[in-house]
Image: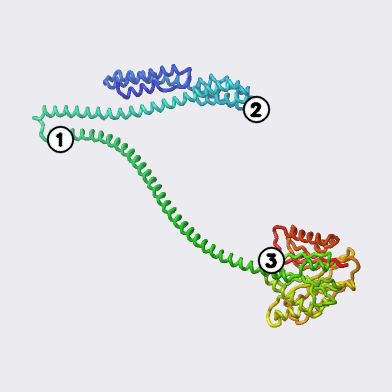
Amino acid sequence: MPVSLKIIFLYYINKPYNGSLCKLHFRLNTLISAALLVALTTTLYMRNIGSFIFLIAIFFFHSVEGAGKKSSSGKEVEDKRSVVIKAIESAELYDKSGKTKRAITELEKIIETAKICGDENLLAKTYELLIQFNHKTGARKKEEEYTYWLNLIKTAAEKKQLERQSRKNELEITKLRKQNHEAEIDKQQTEEELSKQTDELKRAKDSLDFLDLKNKEHLAQIDLLKKEREIEDLKIKEQESRLKNQELVIKEKDARHRFITAIIASLILGIITLSVLAYVIYKNLRQKRLYSEQIEKQLGVIKHQHENITNSINYAQKIQNAMLPNESDYQHLFEDSFILFKPKDIVSGDFYWFFNVNEGDRGNEAGTEISNRVIIVAADCTGHGVPGALMSMVGYNLLNMIVYNKIYEPHLILSELNKNVRSALQQDKNDNKDGMDMALCVINRESKTIEFAGAKNPIIVIKNGEIEHLKGDKHPIGGSQGEAHRDYTKHTISYDGDTQIYMFSDGYVDQFGGPESKKFMIKNLKDLLLKIHREPFNKQKDILNKTIEEWKGTKEKQIDDILVMGMKVN
């Protein structure tokens, strides 16, 4: 049987059909049609023309009859398919309206109809909706049953797809084999014809010209060459296909080689970059180490110099402390008294000074014998630290010189001190602007009076629970004002009974701190003194020190020297 007839026969035997009721009938029709086609081909091959025409007539009649039956069967299947589609739409509407069980009933009715239609998609849709609706209603067994059938349908569909693909591949292979077979047959036929023609030429060589014989042989050779050329073309196409595959493999290898080369180049470039960076970092670290060693040497020199300067300042502190009067001598003159002295640095620009005017021996400073008149000074020199300390020594020595010259009036002492400071610093010849602020009191126990004069600095007097704030004059001792002589105002206060006197520099009231980082201010100091003036004086000193430390806190630093002196006269 020829290969073409085998292909037709296999196609019609294995062709899938839809519809379980009409499958058998339709397949029988298909078998009959295939048999007729085989018979037709055979008669044509055997050159039986009469039988061939007869079979064509029978095949035509059978085809018309089969087409009519097929159209009738197809219409019936289409009607059932419409019924299934409408039932699915109704079930979806029932489910949306909350009638899920009704939807399940409608779908179960059309399962067999969907199977008859042979449409796997409709049947799968029906099972999917039944699984979904039974899941909603909690019918697990039904859900599992329909899931099983749905999986069977899907598996069958996948199997049919694989079978169709397999048949398609077989047809392609058969087609190629047919082409090769036909080419071989044509070659054999051509060779046979050539052999026949050669025999005829031998039998008729006496009657034919030698030239005609050569022409025929030439023509036969040309035909043979054409057939061989066709076969060679087929082989060349096959080789080209193989070459294309090899080219793809080679290109893939080249791409992989280029990728590996690019990675290696990147790694080499990265190693070079890292090496350069490492060298630069090493060089920088080495340079930093050299700089660090130089800085450490310089820091050592600076530290040594700082130690020398600190030692010098500490020694200056000893000198300053030696020059200042002892607090015990001050408490000898005033039994109830205190001195709160807090330098900002090691040495201070604030200083205190007092002088006991001994009527019997007026030249005895701070004598042990208590006289009727005592001079007390609280001073604040320009600056703080070493410059302020130098000015404090100037002021301290000039005050001693003035009282040794028997000047005891407070306003006159300030005027003489201003003149001597200007002379000592030669302020009339240069632009020196150093000076000092000062509060000076002369307490006369005999007349029970307090005489006060101030160069910018005030005093606070508390009598019988009443506070009095005596302000000094606005110009300081020395400083930037250019006049050679200055007059200061003397204030006289009488006292009867216990009276407290407080003298201070501006370091206490100007200290920053508190929750808003503001100055302490004179008002807060007055309120504090009025609150604590009846406490023992050693306790007053502690309260004042604790208050300013808490006000300063840890955020603020001490900005100036602090000096507060307190005493009680009675």
How far across and down, in percent of the image, does residue 402 sit? Answer: 78, 79
Amino acid at the residue labelled 1 = Asn
At 28% from the left edge and 20% from the top edge, which residue is drawn?
49
Give the mark, 3 or 1, whose residue is nearer the N terminus. Answer: 1
Give the mark, 3 or 2, whose residue is nearer the N terminus. Answer: 2
Q: Is residue 439 visible?
A: no
How far across and down, in percent of the image, does residue 194 sit? Answer: 18, 29
Q: Is residue 350 visible?
A: yes
Describe the element under mark 3 as helix, strand or loop.
Answer: loop
Q: Nearer the viewer, residue 280 or 502?
A: 502
Callout 3–callout 1 Cβ contact below 8 Å: no
At 49% from the left edge and 62% from the top edge, which residue is drawn?
290
Categorize mark 1 by other alpha carbons within 10 Å: few (<14), some (14-19), many (20+): few
**Badge nearest the viewer, 3 or 1:** 3
Amino acid at the residue labelled 2 = Ser
At 89% from the left edge and 71% from the top edge, which residue is drawn?
448
Q: Dot 3 corresponds to which residue?
A: 345
Describe the element under mark 2 as helix, strand or loop.
Answer: loop
Q: Dot 1 corresponds to which residue?
A: 215
User: For residue 558, what is the image quadrant?
Assistant: bottom right
**Badge nearest the viewer, 3 or 2:** 3
How far across and down, in percent of the image, does residue 67 sit? Answer: 43, 21
Task: Classify residue 182 as left or right of residue 413.
Answer: left
Q: Quadrant of the N terminus?
A: top left
- From the viewer's perspective, is residue 349 above or below residue 136? below
Colour pattern of the rendering: rainbow
Give the mark, 1 or 2, whose residue is nearer the N terminus. Answer: 2
Q: Residue furthest left?
A: 206
The circle on residue 97 is 2
